[in-house]
Image (cartoon, rainbow, N blue to C red):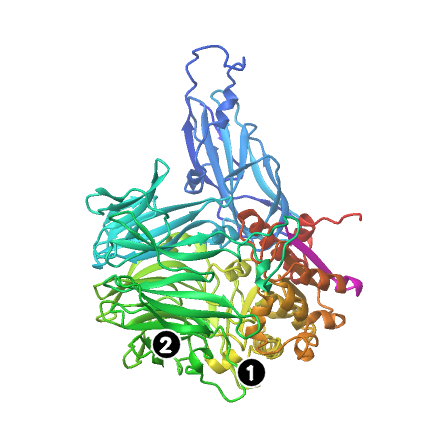
Amino acid sequence: MYKKVICAACGAALSLSSFGETIDIKSLNYSGPFEVATPFMLDSIDANSAKFDTLAILKTPISMNAAEKGSKFTNQVLPASRTPALHLLNFTLDNGRYFNGSLKVSGLKNREIYLDGKLITDEKLALAPATHSITVKCLTLPGNQPDSVRISIESDGKTQVTINKEQGRRYTLRDVMTGQRIKSASLSPSGKYLLTTYSFTHEGGDNTFNTQISELSSGRVLLSSTETLRWMPDCDQLYLTRNVNKKLRFITLNPLTHEERVIADDIPTHSFMLSPTADFFVYLKNQDEPKEKNADLYEIVNPEDRQPGWRSRASLMKFDLASGLSSPLTFGYRNVTPAGISADGSKLLFMAYDTKVEQRPSSVVSLYLLDLKSGACMTLLENEGFIGGASLSPDGKTVALTASPEGLGSIGKNLPDGMTPNMYDNQLYVMDVATKKVTPLTRDFNPSVESFAWSKADGNIYFTAEDRDLKSLYRVNPTNGQIDNLKALEEYVMSFDLSATAPVLVYTGQGASNSDRLYSVSLKNGRQNLIEDLSAKRLEGVRLGECKGWPFVTSRGDSISVRYILPPDFDPSEKYPMIVNYYGGCSPTSRTFESRYPHHVYAAHGYVVLVIIPRGSAGFGQEYAAHHVNTAGEGVADDIIEAVKAFTDSHSWVDSKKIGCIGASYGGFMTQYLQTKTDIFAAGISHAGISDHTSYWGEGYWGYSYSEVCMANSYPWTRKDLFVDRSPLFNADKIHTPLLFLHGDSDTNVPFGESIQMYTALKRLGRETAFVAVRGANHQVTEFNKRKQWQETIFAWFAKYLQDDPSWWEAMYPKKSL
């Protein structure tokens, strides 16, 4: 009988620090033997004239998941087999920092090695911080002599590793970038059925989508589809569009019987607003944009004319589903968008947009109510600034509007004299269509309104709002102005949907330490029901560090939101480096789990993560948000510096000499600006940051229009103190902190040159700096592989300066003899 000795596969799980030593793997998971029959020799050679090689059986596919779920190996010998057999030996390696080392497997001549499910040919290991699965797949043949084996890890001497940690694996960038998520959820008109759309991001960035129809009360699944489905507005039927013979069909689908019915066979578009009466829809028809006579020269007729597609204009069309007739509803050069159709299908609310560069704000909106039968059109607002969205009440008598406090004659403004409101602080208003009287609903309400919807069932308006660093769910009675917090069970409500006729609502949300969950809410008694906890699936077996709030009051008396995330293996007797994250602009760094800077991944790398929401953010009240206006970062920087110092002083486990900071866009500017005012940071990262307010004002696609928010009624020629004196470029000589600049070289928001000029200044001054450009990326890095490398660049920079380990950085960006 054949037996192969495994002398490394006994003993308890090993938890050992590695400092330039060899670790023998003392505990393995084992799966097998998987007997593989020798194939019937139909011929003596294959199509390539090669003879059968028994060792080729090693290439037989087998799931690596079987190895991780195997039993503890204690017998020291592999089970015998009368035929060729495959065996899987598995262990995990947990490293909180970048690991350089090698894997040594002695014996087992017929073997392959898999790292995190992928075959590797080199036994050298260069591992990002994570919990890694290592599997040795081996082939045994009957009659061979027993062979002992030793599996060991050789460390570079810098990284602490743990073998077969039992408390769960680390949260990684792969968890953030791949996997299943809830894309949207919506209720059928009766509230009986739920449509949930899921997205799945695969390794490499490919996305697949799936829609599921279920019974709300029982959860019973009625239908699954990969097509885009939506509810009909007047019954519990679904509709979809489908290309058939190069024509676009409008089809209804019964979720119970799965019966399809073709309603219209040649519709003009798949993107439209379907009438509540379900007999027509409204869509946009693009106009041909004016062309230049000379292909080599072009005139810019407006600062925004630099933007591709800015000259494109659209008009509104009505498509009758019964006749197939498309009728024009609007004509003109202004862009339009539909905002709602009355419940009886008789009236259309729509908005028209125009640009007035000479005034603030430069974008203005007109709001119209069109009678679809008579063609009569009522003007509700004309060239009004500061307007956001609009929605028609179910009875068509009232319009809900969002606008900043300066909109609608400043009726919603609630600020001390002399202060200019923040244009991103959204207020909710209602307008009576008959009288055009506007009533502010949230003037004394601190949260900043986001999305909103009228309820046909109870006549209330439901909305989400930025509530400090949360996004909460509310309803308001438009008659008396009473606002109720629905007390959503998630810290950040991502989306919600109302039933047309039943008193029920569904919403999706995340928290600072959990992924997607889906809930229903009874609007009668407020009872909430968890429909699906996708987070439990996504985070199964993952260990996270604690996330805690830290109340802080600045020397100015402002209460600002601060939270911190601890490493998953936190030990208060140790000293930890810390990363500080902020935005510093108009939106708070919210409590989303899977953000641009995934805080729990940083924590898994051994950092304390401090998230600060300084003054100037919406969601804290009008006065708090107004501190963003005409300050050019001055108060924001003070808040961040004060909070960091106070937090460090009161928490002994923070290494005050190893603090880094990171931000993007206005937060990238803040990274640069902070270094001109303090030396508390050991390293900083500026992604797409503004270095010169004057150049950004004129060059960015939205530079001058964003300056209408942050530099209201101030200009480079009137406020040198803001545009020049508080620009990091003009204070570059004050910076001594090592700074990394990251920037997409196709950024149209904050031009690429904003990082180039600051990097050049610091190089000229002989300061420590680096500049990594992302080819083809715009303001955000969204393409899968680019985002992965961009994020690993961030990790590597902080490891170099906050963990005194340049190996990751040098592996990514080796020194060049130039």
Q: Which residues are magenta?
A: 762-775
Front residue (pair 521, 237): 237
Residue 193: quadrant of the picture: bottom left
Nearest to N terminus: mark 1 or mark 2? 2
Q: Position of residue 467 (x, y in %)?
A: 42, 74
Residue occupying image coordinates x 46% and y 62%: 334
Q: Position of residue 104 (x, y in %)?
A: 60, 38
Q: Is 53 covered by the magenta stretch? A: no
Q: Nearer the viewer, mark 1 or mark 2?
A: 2
Residue 50, above or below 343: above
Name the residue that disc number 1 marks: 554
Residue 706: quadrant of the picture: bottom right
Q: Position of residue 709 (x, y in %)?
A: 55, 74
Front residue (pair 449, 396): 396
Q: Which mark is residue 429?
A: 2
Q: From the viewer's perspective, tell me whether residue 455 is left or right of residue 687.
A: left
Res. 575 visible in picture: no
Residue occupying image coordinates x 44% and y 32%: 62
Name which residue type carries label 1.
Answer: Thr
**Is there CB contact under 8 Å for labels 1 and 2?**
no
Res. 143 visible in picture: yes
Q: Which mark is residue 199?
A: none
Q: From the viewer's perspective, tell me whether residue 590 is left or right of residue 679.
A: left
Tell me the crowding category of disc 1: few under 14, some 14 to 19, or many 20 or more residues within 10 angstroms, Cα based.
some
Front residue (pair 253, 365): 365
Spatial CA span between label 1 and label 2: 33 Å
Residue occupying image coordinates x 66% and y 72%: 673
Q: Secondary structure at mark 1?
A: loop
Name which residue type carries label 2.
Answer: Tyr
Q: In which quadrant is the N terminus drawn?
A: top left
Tell me the crowding category of disc 2: few under 14, some 14 to 19, or many 20 or more residues within 10 angstroms, Cα based.
many
